[in-house]
Image (cartoon, grey):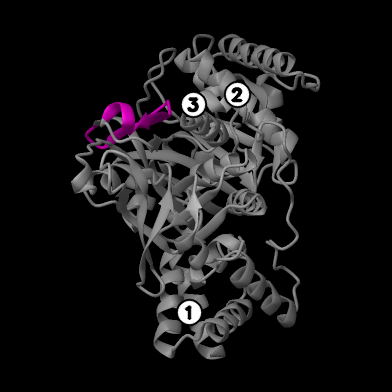
Amino acid sequence: MKRDLSELSTRQFDLVVVGGGVLGASVARDAALRGLSVALVEQADFCSATSHNSLKTIHGGIRYLQHLNFKRAAESIREQQIFLQTAPHLVQPMRFLMPAYGFGMRGPAALGIGVALYELLNACVALIDGRRLKAPKGRVLGAKRYREMVPGMEDQPLSGGAMWMDAQVSLADKAVLQMLQQAAEHGASVANYVTADAPLFREDDPQVIAGVKARDMRSGACFDIQGHAVVNATGPWAASWINGADEAQLSMQLGLVKSMNLVTRKPALPHGVAVRSNRASDSKVDSANRMFFVVPWQGKTMIGTTHVAHEGAEVDDRVGPGDVADFVEEFNEVYPELGLTPEDVLYSYAGLAPAMQEEGAEAVPLHESEIIDHGIVDGIVGLFSIVSVKWTTARLVAEQTVDQLLGAEAKARPCQTRSVDLPDYENMPHEIAGLTEAQLRAFVRQHVDGTQAWRLSDVLLRRTNDLVLGAMSAQQFEVVVSEMAALLGWSEETRSAEISLVLERLSNAAQKADLSAQIELIS
């Protein structure tokens, strides 16, 4: 997956994908596996914005049953099954539990009906697709059994609980890199830190797309990328990117919410737990509450997800101490047994997502993805925008996008990603625990050369999870810094700036101060 700007600027591509998150990577992978020539550019690092904000779950869609959205639930179930089959090194089954209270809509009987419907949908989807489905894992639990499985619930007035099987993508950033690597193996040209400033139009027909005007963020050099079609997969930047094309008379409106997931130092349970917030949801079954998910991840506990209305035109997903404190306060209202404090938070994943509605501080993300053909909407042939809402269904949305792009030709070039395995590439190591200094330096070189890591944050926040999990020593931190400085020719000023940017992303003040002091002593 080499970064080759000369190839980008000289080839004529069938498709140019703008955006290197999970959606853009999925589109590039799908198109490349169908034999299309593909270019993908990302303005920052791959999977560094909205897609980085992941709860590490591949939800099978049980949440959509409370909206009575059976189609959406079935889609999520199918995508989960595809992930489990084609990428077992990245996605594994994970058990979830939910407490029951009383004997109404939150009681054991109601939860049992939901789990039974979920199991039935799983079986139907597997049967239709010709997959073997293991024995059902969902069932209703008694109050005593639930308390045994979820410690600290002794004082809760439980009437029982429910259990079902979901899935987890423990290395979400790596999954995106591997999608891009597979696309590159099938001829795609992929580059990060390249911004697509605007769409490019044919000189003889300004209503037909001809690629994008690009700029190398490393050198500042500008160049054109020629393509017969362009897919705008820029996430929260989708509307601003389209609206910036003045000469095309394009228009796109997109409301945004800021979503957040916390990595905490709390020891992980062997399963996930779903608890109801005291804040409103838009459920058609029980409109009183939305959900928190408490997820085991790499020995720690992740908690998500909050959604807060994003105000203003600037696309800013930064998280402040107040955001974390508000999250912790809301969570403690419904799960005080965990004893969560802001000091327990190690890292805050945050990102902007499309909004369905905004009411004061409350916000509701979209439930459905949308593929916009600007040939139909704006009369610009060959330009597509995607408004996507879920990590789990990114592969499906990519399939639908490429089908729409190909039109009648899609039957002759059917989607391959439903059944083709996503390889576990050996040139993408992720774990650094136990590595010698020489091995850690080799790890950095592999990612600078092979996955286009360019900033310190690219390596420390996405190529490995050790820093995010609070498991990286100052010595390891310094080795990564010194190796990247040597490889990329950083000045002392650049080196200091890169360190500061990474430390700013950490949420735990004590951890930041301690790590900063140790790094200063070492260096």
Amino acid type, callout 1: Ser
- What residue is drawn where x is 53% and y is 13%? 70
Where residue 283 sits, quadrant-wise, is top left
| Mark 2 nearby-residue class (10 Å; few <14, some 14–19, many ≥20) | few
- What residue is drawn where x is 43% and y is 55%? 342
> Is label 2 or label 1 in front?
2
- Which residue is identified by label 1? 516
Helix or strand or loop: what does disc 1 sit on?
Answer: helix
Residue 241 covered by magenta stretch = no
Measured along the vertical axis of the image, is residue 375 above or below residue 185? above
From where the camera sits, is residue 339 visible? no
Amino acid type, callout 2: Lys
Q: Which mark is residue 407?
A: 3
Is the C-beta separation of discs 2 and 3 under 8 Å?
no
Distance CA(mark 3)–CA(mark 1): 55 Å
Distance CA(mark 2)–CA(mark 3): 8 Å
Q: Which residues are magenta?
A: 359-377
The disc, 2 or 1, on the residue closer to the chain's N-terminal end is 2
**Apparent side of residue 121 relative to residue 236 in the rendered image (left or right):** right
| Mark 3 nearby-residue class (10 Å; few <14, some 14–19, many ≥20) | few
Coordinates of residue 340 in the picture (x, y in percent): 49, 48
Measured along the vertical axis of the image, is residue 302 above or below residue 59? below
From where the camera sits, is residue 504 visible? yes
Coordinates of residue 390 in the picture (x, y in percent): 49, 35
- Which residue is identified by label 2? 411
The disc, 3 or 1, on the residue closer to the chain's N-terminal end is 3
Coordinates of residue 34 in the picture (x, y in percent): 62, 38
Q: Quadrant of the N terminus?
A: bottom right
Measured along the vertical axis of the image, is residue 226 above or below residue 512? above
Distance CA(mark 2)–CA(mark 1): 57 Å
**Apparent side of residue 15 relative to residue 74 in the rendered image (left or right):** left
